[in-house]
Image (tube, rainbow, N blue to C red):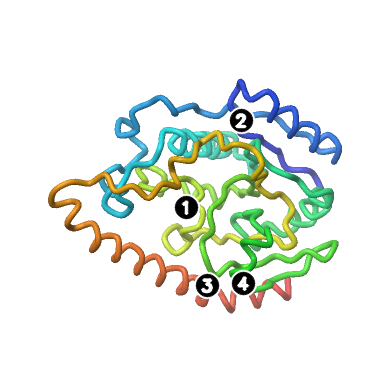
Amino acid sequence: MTQPPIYIISLPDSHERRKNMAAQLNALGLSYEFFDAIDARGTKVTDCLDYDSDKRRRYFGRDLTGGEIGCLLSHKALYQKMLDENIEAAVIFEDDCIISEQFGAVLDELMGKTHLFDCIRFLGSDKVMKRGGRKVLELTGGHWLVRMPTAPGGAHATLMTLKGVKKLMPHLSPTPYPIDTVLGRCWETGLNAYTIIPGLALHNEELESAIGDKRFQKIIELEGVDKTLYPLTRTWFKLNEGLGKRWFFYSTYFRDKSSLRA
């Protein structure tokens, strides 16, 4: 099976991260290229045309960080490249991954099954899988294609198809969400996304995030009427999200069962 292109989204000056990713992929005998990330850490996020600040603050009480905006724009730029060059499928890494030795073998098998999915999110860590999931298809080396009942964060490693990109792009301009959240909101985008267990490309939590940790702070920056309404808008968002996750998980049951016979 022909290897799909592998892109590593990385800031141009992230030399050590690039060196680490290159070493891992070279050891696996996989070809790759670096895709320069967009650095928006010093920008005024509300000036970004691809970002819906009003909705973000209504649902989360604060804006995305510049780092999150840069990450969103970087992935979007790579999706646009896939559209412009008619790339049917591509592996997209961020530069903070730990890649399994079995990645190449499973990737090769997945490339023969792209009719079954729009996207593979390589999120199969023990922490993520404690939330459960539906085993859909057994793969080489004891790995499984799994449907997640939740929408965990993480965009550090994906196998994205062109048909998946076409579903995502209308939801990226503008959006109130970081890219990993968009990837998880399948009930909105229609993205048919799975993960793999055991994990094949995990986030290296020992590395300091290039996005920064401010995104984890639960700071409410609203004032006046907006602050008064926030408990209601936040509750509405959580209710809608919870129902959306459950609806999509259960509505895909028969689709997943048919995949077992693929």
Q: Gap between marks 4 and 2, in whole Å?
A: 31 Å
- Above or below for 176 versus 124: above
Graded by Cα atoms within 10 Å as few (under 14), some (14 to 19) or many (20 or more), the crowding at tag 1 reads some
Identify the residue at horizontal 61%, vertical 34% (top origin): 9
Identify the residue at horizontal 58%, vertical 60% (top origin): 193
Q: Gap between marks 1 and 4, in whole Å?
A: 19 Å
Graded by Cα atoms within 10 Å as few (under 14), some (14 to 19) or many (20 or more), the crowding at tag 4 reads few
- Above or below for 111 versus 82: below
**SS assignment at label 2:** strand
Tell me if residue 170 can be seen.
Answer: no
Q: Gap between marks 3 and 4, in whole Å?
A: 12 Å
**SS assignment at label 3:** helix
Q: x, y percentage for residue 73? A: 47, 35
Q: x, y percentage for residue 192? A: 56, 61
Lower sequence index among marks 3 and 1? 1
Residue that numbered label 1 is attached to = 181
Identify the residue at horizontal 70%, vertical 65% (top origin): 145
Amino acid type of the residue tagged 1 in the rendering: Thr
Disc assigned to residue 10: 2
Comparing labels 1 and 4, the label whose residue is closer to the camera: 4
